[in-house]
Image (tube, grey):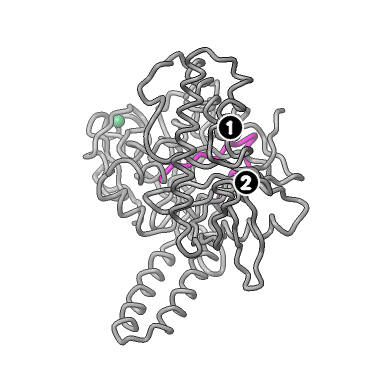
Amino acid sequence: MTTNPLVKTLDFQLDIQSDNEGLLYDATLEARSVYNETIRLAKEGVDWNTIPDRVADDANLVKNTTQRVVAKALGAMENYYEYDDFGLPSHTKEGTYPLRANYEEGYNLTLTDEGDVAFRISAKPYKHVKGVLEGSDAHLDILKTALESDEWKVGTAEALFHNDTPELHVNVTNTEQTVRDKEDSRIVVGVDVNEDNVALTALSEDGVEDTLVIDFPEIKFERHRYFTMRKRVQNAGKDSIHDTLEGREERFVRDRLHKVSRHTVEWSQQFERPCIVFEDLKEMRDSIDYGTRMNRRLHHLPFRALQFYTSYKASFEGIPTAWIDPAYTSQRCPICGHTERANRHKKRFKCTSCEHQDHSDRGASVNIAVKGIKKHQDWNVPALNSLPVVRKVRRQASGAVDAPTVTHATVRGYQADGRMGVSD
Ligand SMILES: [Zn+2]
C-alpha cells in the first residue's frame, strides 16, 4: 500500500506593513518574466539543467526563489509533453505569477507576543515585505501548531495576488502521519455540503453501499438569528456588542462544523480503504456563475471550513481526500445520467427522463462520488439501477440522534404518488 506524507496547504491574506504592497506586486511580475523566459529557453531546446542558472543571473529576485519558479515552469512543460498538447497559447502569459519560496530562505514566519503570525518575504534581493497573516481560525491554528511543534515541518510557500488581494499559501507537512494514496481506494465517499445538511454516499465497484444525510438545521437557524441581532445593534451604533456577537456566532458555527466533520470521517471509516471526495467550490467561485442555488450555498455556510475540517480529520486517520469539478452535480440523474436543471426542486429530485425520484442532496453526493471514481480510480463506475434508502441523523447540541428513515422510489421507472416521505 502506497502512502504519502500528510501535507496541508494553508491559505492566508497578507496584511502588509506600510506601502510594501507595490514591492510584492513588482516581484510577482518579475516571477512571471522568469516563468516565461524558462518556457522560452525550454522550447528552444536548451539543456534544462542549465536553465536555472541562466535565468537566475538576469532575474531581480532572490536566487533561491528564482530556482523555485524555474522548477515550477519546467514542471508545467513536462506536463505539456506528457499530455501531448505542447504549444498551446496558454503556455506563456501576462500578469503576475506566484512567488515560490523555501521556508527560512525566501520567507520567514514568527509568532508574535500578541498571538499573531508575522511574515517576512524576501521579495527582491535585500528587500523584504513584512506584516501579519490573516485568515480563518482553522488555517491559523494549524500554522501556529506547526511553528511550535517538531511534529510539523513548514515547507515552501507561494506569495500571490488573488483578486488583487495579496495572499500567502503555506505548505506544512506532518512528519509522523501518512495518508494512503487516493488512487488506492475501494470506496469513494461523495460529500455534498449544504446550508442545513451534508449528504454522504459511499460508492464501490458494486454500487451504492450506503447513504447518510446529517442534518444541522440549527446552524442555519443560529446564523440567521445572529445576523438579525447584529444588524439591530449595528443600527443602534453599538459596535462593541456587534463584535462580541460576531465572535460568539463564529465559535458556535465552528464548534458545530467540527462535530459534523468528525461524524463524516467516522462514518467513512466503516468502509474498507475509503477516499473522501468534495466539490471544489473555490475553483467555482473564481470561474463561472453557477446560478442562484450555488451562489446561495457559497454565501450561506462556511463550506470551505467544513470541507477543510473534514479533510484535515480524515488525514489524521490516514484517509485520503480528493476534489472534483462541481459542474452539474445537483442536476444529473444518478440512475440514467440525464442532466437538466428542471430535475431538481429544492430537496426533491425527479428525473424528467426516467422518472427516478430521490432526496436531491443524496443524488448530488452520488454524482460527486461518480466523478471522484472517474478522476482517481482505475476501476469502473458501477451501473446504478437502484439506490438504498437514505438514512438521516440530526446533529444537535447533545449529539447525533437518528431521524426517521426516509423511503422513496429506488427503481427505474418507478411511479410514485408524488410524495417522497422526505421530511424537509
Ligand atoms: Zn433519470
Q: Where residue 77 sits in the image (x, y, percent)?
A: 50, 21
Residue 371 lies in quadrant: top left
Are there few (<14), some (14-19), or many (20+) residues within 10 Å of tag 2?
Answer: many
Q: Is residue 154 left or right of residue 70?
A: right
Residue 145 lies in quadrant: bottom right
Q: Determine which of the numbered discs, if any, sits on residue 25 in the image.
A: none
Note whether ligand 1 is within 8 Å of mark 2. no
Looking at the image, residue 252 lies above or below residue 130: below
Q: Tell me whether the residue at label 1 lies in contact with that at label 2, contact meaning CB atoms closer than 8 angstroms.
A: no
Q: Is residue 345 left or right of residue 46?
A: left
Q: Comparing marks 1 and 2, which lies closer to the viewer?
A: 1
Magenta region: 264-281
**Rendered residue at 58%/23% (across/down):** 51
Q: Amino acid at mark 1?
A: Ala
- State the quadrant of the C terminus: bottom left
Taking the magenta stretch, the answer to whether it contains residue 186 is no
Near-viewer residue (136 or 357):
136
**SS under mark 2:** loop
Q: Is residue 369 left or right of residue 144?
A: left
Q: Amino acid at mark 2?
A: Gly
Query: How many numbered marks appear?
Result: 2
Read off the residue under disc 1. Answer: 56
**Rendered residue at 38%/20% (across/down):** 88
Read off the residue under disc 2. Answer: 106
Residue 204 lies in quadrant: top right
